[in-house]
Image: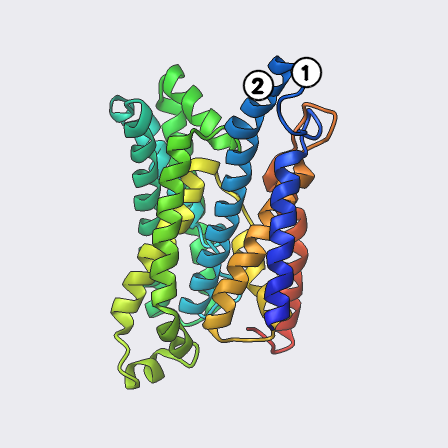
Amino acid sequence: MKLKFILFLVLLAALFAADVLVGSTGVLWPFGGSDASAGEIAQRILFDFRLPKAAVALLAGIALAASGLLMQTVFRNPLAGPYVLGVSSGASLGVAVFLLGLPMLGGAGIARDLGVAVSAWIGAAAILLLVMAVSARIKDIMAVLILGMMFGSAASAFVDVLQYFSSDTALKGFVIWSMGSLGGLSHGQLLIMAVCVAGGLLLAAGSVKSLNLLLLGEGYARSMGVSVKRVRGVIFLATSLLAGSVTAFCGPIGFVGIAVPHIARMVFRRADHRVLLPASVLIGADMMLFCDLVSQLPGSDLILPVNTITALLGIPVVVMVVVNSKRGRIM
C-alpha cells in the first residue's frame, strides 16, 4: 500500500511539472540568457499564469474528491457527489444571487472574491440540508439521488430567472464566471481557495473515525458514542467549504467527486477512511492535473473546457458503479 501512495505522489509531481511547462507557448526553459526581455516574459507566464493554474487544478482535484467521498459515506450512496446531488448547482445559485440579484454588494478586489466564495458556501449548504432532510425520511438511495438532482435543477432554474431579469453588466460578469476555468485566478483568489480547501480537509480528517463507524450504520455509530447529528454538521460544513470554493472560483466541475472515491477503493481495496481520504485526495489531484494537461493544445491558443475532459474520464467509472450495484456490489 505504501508503494501505491509513493507512485501516486511521483505521478502528482510529474503531472504538476508537466502542467506548468506545457502550454500554447511550449516549454518554458530556464530564464535569462542573451534575450533579457524573453526571460522576463517567460517569468511572467510562469508565475502569473502557469503556476497559479496548476495550483488551482491541484486544489480543485483535492476538494472535489474529498467532498465526494464524504457525501458517499454520509448518504451511504455510491452515486453521491457534489455535482450529481445538486451541491454545485446550489453553489452556482448562491453566486448568481450575489452577482445578479445583489450587484450593489459585488464590490471589487478581495471583497468581491470573499463575497462570491461565501455565497457559494451558503448555496451549497442549503442544497445539502435539503437533501439530508429528505434522506432522513426516505431510505431509498435512488429516490434521494433523484430528489437531489431535482433540487439542483430547481437551483439552475432560479439562476435562469435571475439571468433574465439582470442588467447587462451584471449578466456579463456572471456569464464569464459560469464558463468556468482553472486559469485566470488572481493570487488573492488562490489564497482564499487554498485556505478554504485546507479548512475543509482538516474537518474531514478530524471526522475519519466517525466516518468509519457510519459505514456500519447510524445505529451502530450511536451505540459507539458517536453524535451523528454533530458529525453530519461537521461533514456538511466541510463539504460546503470544499465543493463551494471550487464552484465559486472555477465554476461547476462534474464527475470528479463521484468517480475518484470509487477509483481509490478499487486501487487500494480498502473501506477504511484513514486510507481512502488521503488516497482520494491524491488521485483527485492527479486526475485534475491530467485533465488540465489534456485540455491544452500545445502550439495552439485553444483550450478545451476542463469539464469535457472530466466527463469523458468520469462517466465510464459511474457506469461501472451502476452496473456493479445491480449485481449487489454497491460500495
Mark 1 residue crowding within 10 angstroms, few (<14) / some (14–19) / many (20+)? few
* Residue sitting at the far right: 299
Say if 303 sits above or below 17 in the image. Answer: above
Residue at left offset 49%, top offset 46%: 60
Residue 130 showing in the rendered view: no
Coloring applied to the structure: rainbow
Query: Would you name the residue on which mark 1 appears?
Result: 34
Residue type at tag 1:
Ser
Q: Position of residue 166 (x, y in %)?
A: 35, 22
Q: Is residue 265 left or right of residue 113?
A: right
Mark 1 residue element: loop
* Residue sitting at the far front: 34
Mark 2 residue crowding within 10 angstroms, few (<14) / some (14–19) / many (20+)? few
Query: Would you name the residue on which mark 2 appears?
Result: 40
Q: Position of residue 81 (x, y in %)?
A: 48, 57
Residue at left offset 28%, top offset 62%: 233
Say if 220 sits above or below 171 in the image. Answer: below
Mark 2 residue element: helix
The quadrant of the picture occupied by the C terminus is bottom right
Residue at left offset 55%, top offset 51%: 285
Marks 1 and 2, how far apart at CA: 12 Å
Residue at left offset 34%, top offset 27%: 99
Q: Is residue 142 left or right of residue 217?
A: right
Q: Are marks 1 and 2 in contact (CB under 8 Å)?
A: no
In terms of depth relative to the viewer, which is nearer, 148 or 277?
Answer: 277
Q: Position of residue 127 (x, y in %)?
A: 35, 51
Residue 139 showing in the rendered view: yes
